[in-house]
Image (cartoon, rainbow, N blue to C red):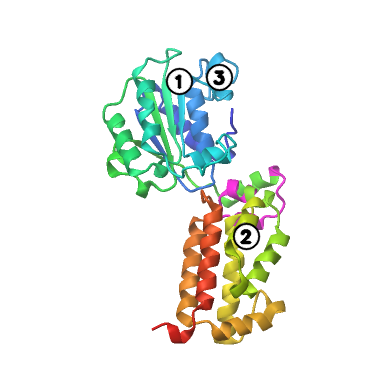
Amino acid sequence: MRELYPWQQEVWQRLNGLRARLPHALLLKGAQGIGKFDLAMNLAQSVLCEQPRADGMACDTCPSCHWFGQESHPDFRLLQSEALAAEDGVGEGGKKPARQIIVDQVRALSDFSNLSSHRGGYRVVLVHPAESMNANAANALLKTLEEPPGQMLFILVTHKPQHLLPTILSRCHGIAVAMPSAQASLDWLQQQGVTDASVLAQAGFAPLLARKLAEQGDASEEHELVIQALRRPEEMDEFALADRLKSKRVEPAKVIQWLQQWCYDLAGAKFAQKIRYYSQYSDSINKLAASSPVFELLQLHRDLSVAKREAYHPLEPKLLFESLFASYRQALRSRPEKSV
Ligand SMILES: [Zn+2]
């Protein structure tokens, strides 16, 4: 059984209250990094459990719970992209894993939904995250949701409900999973042995992301590599750099922050003769700032802000790194006279 996080008690009671008359499809929506997937897995296990506890949680001892724990429950299917599965260590090596849930994965459910349940109870399908379904997959799922098989529960997990088909949304019973309070998150982080409270703000106040950031440490060696590369954009090898960052599992949000601070200094040097973060490299910064065009600098700043919002769980961090470094190199390479 997975952890039910302290801030999930209330939402758990709401979910548990639905058990008497389960809808065909539930949509758990809320911010990234607050434990929606674990919540969904707990619900799936407890719906399949043969002797759930009084609070609705799975018993963890019945045959059904045993299979669930072994990831081999015949009445459960987890739909996620290959890339995400690979992150959990279940993917196949070699070819690049797909980032989307594809239509074949949804079609493969048809046998599952046509046969009767193996254990005589519910069958559960968890789609995570639901917005990673491509258009064909979403349409195929919609067909199933329009004529739902009996005794079958779909649990969709999403942090981008606006990216789902309205027709799918309308077929789901939506449950908003609230952001925990900062205090609840801090208390929990402390229990997890995370002593640096600043990671919570860095993670946009999402506690699970904060724990991940803390576990990844400060990556100071990679920080130095990135800054040295930024000092000499004309020599930058963004592919090698992205490879290194990925292999060291450096958090994308962290790399974006370094880039943002560096660009902040470039703009500061250009417009206000002020350098805030990297004053030890003021020579390089002044030189780069003098030759970099204003428009490109602003555009780069905008790109970084967008990237930051989406950076906490990119499926392909390496691609993200490459494209950020390439944008930087190009912005610095353009000369004012070239931009019209
Ligand atoms: Zn059980």
Q: What are the residue bounds of the magenta stretch?
A: 191-211
Identify the residue at image location x=36%, y=48%.
163
Q: Closer to the camera, 112 or 232? A: 232
Q: For the residues labelled 3 and 2, say whether their Cβ atoms are less than 8 Å apart.
A: no
Disc 1 and disc 2: Cα gap in Å?
Answer: 44 Å
Q: Pointer 1: what residue?
A: 75
Residue 137 position by quadrant: top left
Disc 3 and disc 2: Cα gap in Å?
Answer: 43 Å
Disc 3 and disc 1: Cα gap in Å?
Answer: 10 Å
Q: Closer to the camera, 248 or 260? A: 248
User: Can you tell which mark lies on residue 240?
Assistant: 2
Q: Quadrant of the C terminus?
A: bottom left
Q: Regarding mark 2 in the picture, which secondary structure is present there?
A: helix
| Amino acid type of the residue tagged 2 in the rendering | Ala
Residue 280 visible within the image: yes
Upstream in the sequence, badge 3 or badge 1? 3
Q: Regarding mark 3 in the picture, which secondary structure is present there?
A: helix
Residue 12 place in picture, x, y as percent: 49, 33
Q: Regarding mark 1 in the picture, which secondary structure is present there?
A: loop
Residue 313 place in picture, x, y as percent: 53, 50
Residue 208 belongs to the span the image colors magenta: yes
Left or right? Give the position of 108 relative to 74.
left
Left or right? Give the position of 109 relative to 290.
left
Identify the residue at image location x=54%, y=45%.
34
